[in-house]
Image (cartoon, coloured by chain):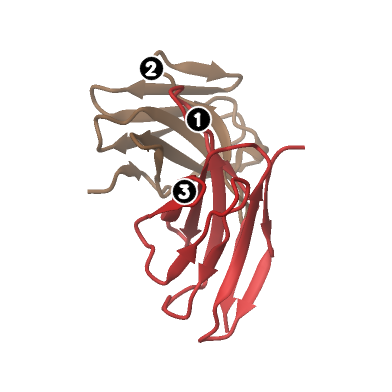
Chain colours: A red, B brown
Amino acid sequence: DGGITQSPKYLFRKEGQNVTLSCEQNLNHDAMYWYRQDPGQGLRLIYYSQIVNDFQKGDIAEGYSVSREKKESFPLTVTSAQKNPTAFYLCASSALGLVYYNEQFFGPGTRLTVL
Amino acid sequence: RKEVEQDPGPFNVPEGATVAFNCTYSNSASQSFFWYRQDCRKEPKLLMSVYSSGNEDGRFTAQLNRASQYISLLIRDSKLSDSATYLCVVMNTGNQFYFGTGTSLTVIP
């Protein structure tokens, strides 16, 4: 079955630690995205990538880093510089091209809690 | 100004009722429009795309008004299983997606 997987589902981090969230897709999508969702708020874009070895900052990139070494993988690192990292993190992917209505598909998310 | 704005609700409606959600967007050059559904503590899932001519999928009808820059979702004959948060999503040039904060719906027996 095609889809997006994220791991781990739950992650606990001590203050001052960096952690990496995994995101893998087998949909052959060119574009991948990382969002953060806080209670009562919409999804906010952290980083996105439309091609291997290239990515762009979203609205709230400070304290996060990403890599895109393979088309199917887009890991997110939450660094110690991120002051309030406790949140629900969602990875998504979509096709690119001249056709509109390239919907986004989401992974099941990772809940990060800082202790 | 936010890219996408929605009334957060909550909407509490009885089973069988008809309920409508509206959403406005700020960028007139927006290309594609969607409604997603998000259940508690789960990821968003596509409910339906919103086409210029309007479209219907069973009990769900979506409309787009480009002149006024708003999108609507109508749910007829509400079921208990429709209880969720409904997200309005707009895609602009460059394949960037913008999400509303969501509208919460609870269908009451």
**Quick check: B104 left or right of B4?**
right
Q: Residues within 10 Å of mark 1 (few under 14, many from 20)?
A: some
Give the residue furthest to the top: B53
- Label 2 to label 1, Cα distance in Å? 15 Å
The secondary structure type at the circle numbered 2 is: loop
- Label 1 to label 3, Cα distance in Å? 15 Å
- Label 2 to label 3, Cα distance in Å? 28 Å
- Give the x, y percent position of residue A112: 58, 70
- Residue A55's tag is none
- Chain under disc 2: B
Circle 3: residue type: Ser
Residue at (41% x, 22% y) in the render? B63
Q: Which numbered disc, 1 or 3, marks the residue closer to the eye?
A: 3
Q: Is residue A51 above or below residue B61?
A: below
Residue at (44% x, 51% y) in the render? A54
Q: Which of the two discs, 1 and 3, labels the residue nearer the N terminus?
A: 3
Residue at (50% x, 54% y) in the render? A34
Q: Which residue is mark 3?
A: A49
Q: Is residue B95 above or below residue B41?
A: above
Circle 1: residue type: Asn
Splitting the image into 4 quarters, where does residue A29 fall?
top right
- The answer to whether residue A18 is visible is yes
- Residue B52's tag is 2
- Chain under disc 3: A
Q: Which residue is mark 1?
A: A102
Circle 2: residue type: Ser
